[in-house]
Amino acid sequence: MAQVKNWQLKRDMKYPYDDNRPNKQIAFVFDTNKCIACQTCTVACKTTWTSGKGEETMFFNNVETKPYGGYPLKWDVNTLKMMGEQSWDKASGEYKGKTIFDDTKGENVNGWRPAERDYAFPNMGEDECSSIVNKGAFFSGIHDTWMFYLARICNHCTYPACLAACPRKAIYKRPEDGIVLIDESRCRGYKECIKACPYKKTFFNMVTRVSEKCIGCYPLIEQGEQPRCVQTCIGKIRMQGFLSKPGEEKADNPIDQIVHIKKIALPLYSQFGTEPNVYYIPPIHVPTDFLHQMFGPGVDKAVEAYKNLKDDKDLLAAFLLFGNSPKTIHHYKREGDFTVGYNEKGEVITKVPMTEPVYVRPYDDKDHGTFRHNTP
Amino acid sequence: MKKLIFLVAITALSESIATAQPTAITIKSEKATNIPFREVNNAVWKDIKAITVAMLPQNITTPMLTISSVRNIKVKSINDGNTIAFLLEWTDSTKDMIVDADKFCDQVAIQLPMHPDTLPIFMMGNKNGRVHIIHWKAIWQNDIENGFRDVKDAYPNYWADIYPMAEKEGDGTKGKFAKDISALDYSKGAGKNFMPAAYAGNPMSIFDRKEPSEECMAESFGTLTTQTNQNATAWGVWENNTWKVIFTRPLVSPDKDDAPLTIPTKIAFAIWNGHFENISGKKHYSQWIDFTTQK
């Protein structure tokens, strides 16, 4: 196995192939605080890509409720259990535990295989709180029970476990955008990727008898557009862009600004070691122990930064671009009272006011001599 | 450097296996007047000498087989001058004939060198050392014996609202959004757009398979490629905790991708036990065994 640099773990780690970062790396930022689990993303993805035969229980995109939800069942808990202690050096932030590429016992990746039935309950644990809300707690303000929605797609990892595990090299990572794809003509349905992917985002199609996965909506990406799940998000929780290589970040790239510079969005279970490229704004009301496990040691600062977002105008300007254009924003700039998003060619593709104007409609509609009210 | 280590490992392993096999064995394809394509218990097999070949867990490359469940395979071969047949038998107490996310099927394969004089590595060949492989899978046997295993066979009570572009004539849906459509029918029309591997022409996604076999070629790990011309046949029967599989192919094949069998050559075998999740490199293999054909 080669030694590769994983910036999320702040150390080198084992990987079956040499370090070979793509020219551009697709990346996403999801704001968990804004997600309402409406599943519009799930449906958009499903109707576009996985509504055919053999894809009945296949969701390239799903939204689950934490702490109890998970599709397929217990996808994260099972991997975490296998990995042993996962500690981080408090001072340096370096990961001290094992990744899924350690102790692989005759395989390329240390993984677990979901049962067929594990895919049958995509909404298990939906809307369930961590515990019962004590009597009277409703009235006392903030109570100590919690839940949040976790939207999930393929992470288009820098070091994909699916790719590492495929003995046929039927999985590849595109150099032009970092999207990880399964060659549907080459896969022979060995299901090694399904066992290996710690996020369980490769799927077996029982009809075509080969594996399938999220394709990052590459036909849209190639036209400068954001994927379906991002475009359709009614809560505007998502942004897709391209993340610069570590050390090459640019302040005018909204994804770099959020991930590399302000470090307010964090990778999910980065201890797996795959360097995932979906970055989450952690939920601000969830106990820190739980968040540490999911999002690593940077989570406290990220939550703090999010709470103070209104004071960081550059960061706020990046956030205000979420969901305001179907196009992929490569650069942005704060211009007066607006934040402006640009495409790769430097053309303006969206312009969003930093402060939305507020209009108050008086109850008394003098023009029509009547009162306005909100009943339909 | 990696290649050198690999070659040293292969050589060392070959030697250890050669010493593990007590005496050099040769499989002879005996002359017969009748070739049974599917009758594993046909009388013609009774008089043919079975050669027992040791099978070992694959531990040369990842993914490796860590639990061995097949010790050996019994091999018989006959030919009538036109067709050659192999009868393979091995003990397997479970009949695993379906595949799914967590289900694996039993499989067997024979491997022949394209150029016996410059013998390639026994494990899938090597670059410029091509091997010809004939592969049988129990799932394909099941497709032919019991019909293609569709979603409805796996989940009789399942419901899907619509399958996009499911165009089926004569079911009252006027050719749109057929409620209950087979994988084969779905793949015939625009529905194929929603079956990516079938659309891409993947040989795994055949819904009207005629033979439970596939002829391939390979030049090392991960290079297995389906041949354009499929002129081999296979048939498997599971009885008394034993799989019996017949392979046949033309003795002298017009297909340039098929290995020669009329000159002294070698043969090797591979077995996958579905019950133990054997798949891909997780298999039992044999060394090259001498093979001759009685003319």
Image (cartoon, coloured by chain):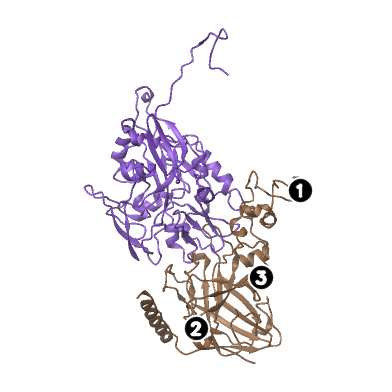
| Residue type beneath disc 2 | Trp
Which residue in the structure is indicated by mark 3? Answer: B211
Task: Give the residue at x 59% y 83%.
Answer: B76
Of the pair A151 and B273, the residue shown nearer to us: A151
Q: Amino acid at mark 3?
A: Glu
Q: CA distance from mark 3 to mark 1?
A: 30 Å
Q: Residue B171's spot in the image, x, y percent? A: 76, 48
Chain B: its colour in the image is brown
Quarter of the picture holding the N terminus of chain A:
bottom left
Can residue A102 be spotted in the picture? Answer: no
**First of labels 1, 2 by sequence position:** 1
Q: Between disc 3 and disc 2, whose residue precedes?
A: 3
Q: How many marks?
A: 3
In the rendered picture, chain A carries what hue? purple
Q: Which of the two residues, A128 or B197, is positioned nearer the viewer here?
A: B197
Q: Residues within 10 Å of mark 2 (few under 14, many from 20)?
A: many
Query: Label 3 is found on which chain of the structure?
Result: B
Q: Residues within 10 Å of mark 1 (few under 14, many from 20)?
A: few
- Amino acid type, callout 1: Asp
Find disc 2 in the rendering and name its residue: B288
Identity of the residue drawn at 49% across and 56% down:
A181
- Residue at numbered disc 1: B171
Disc 2 element: loop
